[in-house]
Amino acid sequence: MNPALLIRLRPSTPWRIGPSSGASGEASPVLHSDSLYSAVCQAMEQLGLLEEWLNATAREFSEPAVRFSSCFPWQRGYLYAPPPAGLWPPQAPSFKLRWKGARLIPTSIIAGLMNRTAPSEDQWVVDGESACLVPSASRSATGPFRFVHRSSAAVDRITGGNVTPHSVACVQFAPASGLWCAAQFSNQNTYAVWAPKIQAAFRLLADSGMGGLRSRGFGRARSVDFQPGLLHELLFGQSAPVKNGNAYWLLSLLSPADSDSVQWESGNYQLTQRSGRTGSVAGGGREKLSSRLVTEGSVILSENPPVGCVQNVAPAGCPHPVYRAGYAVALPIPWPVNA
């Protein structure tokens, strides 16, 4: 198994994570893996490591040295993630809970689902605001975050008139809550080389911010915690069995590589359209080329573990490549399931 690094961010300000629709009045609790990769690229540029980083992670026809999952919420001892499609909701009927109302559930519950163990409806509740499955015994059974709106006004600095008020939706995290992600390395050598540099990049991003409205102080974190290990053990505990088979649960967006032998007629997956704007000064903040990727939580069937690829989505006239990471961070799960 490849080494991994579990990264926990403890936000100190609201985060502006834009939804797929791009609407300012909506926000998402998940920072997708392609956006996370872009943020790390900007941090590596400030650290003077960009060329080395791109050579290690954006080479064609080569396995990347590092892959990132998307960023998902955590709260106290629970890591939340989108459940594997087809394993959720539980097949057993519930007279107290509407299981499918939970879009993010603890990884400990996912480990039980993989072993055909359904959660007890007496121990969990669905938090309606965050759509997270939270312990019923927790303080007031609230989720790790809430959606809030922050208002501001644009003022003409010359005349002092023409005040234009507007508001934007963002994610406000509860105490003892935040975002987590995983960096997965191709082997022990790349871990030794890149783990310290990734830690430096995330500490820089914690100070400068991630997501939207960073110039207004959004997207910052008071601290970052790092935990090395194997990905399945970091998520499920050391007693979690390693599943063998050809079904893989995605924890990142996926842009399949030509070498990936995905059985598209099977599995249980969804696609999403990704766009955005370039972040560099040279790129001029222009809109990137859009592309479709397989979403987190999807289950795909493949003869070998999926790798994925990067896409050059630079707009016309951009003086440098702009990469959208579609590398797979995936775990094997049992299949078939009664979806």
Image (tube, rainbow, N blue to C red):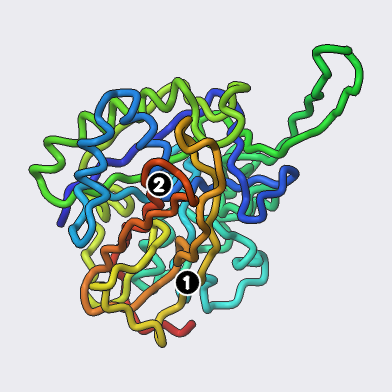
Foreground: 265 or 72? Answer: 265
Residue 83 shows up from this direction? no
Q: Along the horizontal axis of the image, is 219 left or right of 67? A: right
Image disc number at residue 178: none
Task: Identify the image quadrant of residue 149.
Answer: top right
Q: What x and y, as percent, mark residue 320? A: 37, 42
Task: Identify the image quadrant of residue 109.
Answer: bottom left
Question: Disc 2 to disc 1, how far (Cα)?
Answer: 31 Å
Q: Label 2 amino acid? A: Val
Foreground: 167 or 57? Answer: 57
Residue at the location (52% across, 73% down)? 90
Q: What x and y, as percent, mark residue 133? A: 56, 54
Image disc number at residue 322: 2
Foreground: 318 or 106? Answer: 318
Image disc number at residue 85: 1
Q: Label 1 amino acid? A: Ala
Q: Residues within 10 Å of mark 2 (few under 14, many from 20)?
A: many
Residue at the location (27% across, 50% down)? 58
In the picture, which quadrant includes the N terminus? bottom left
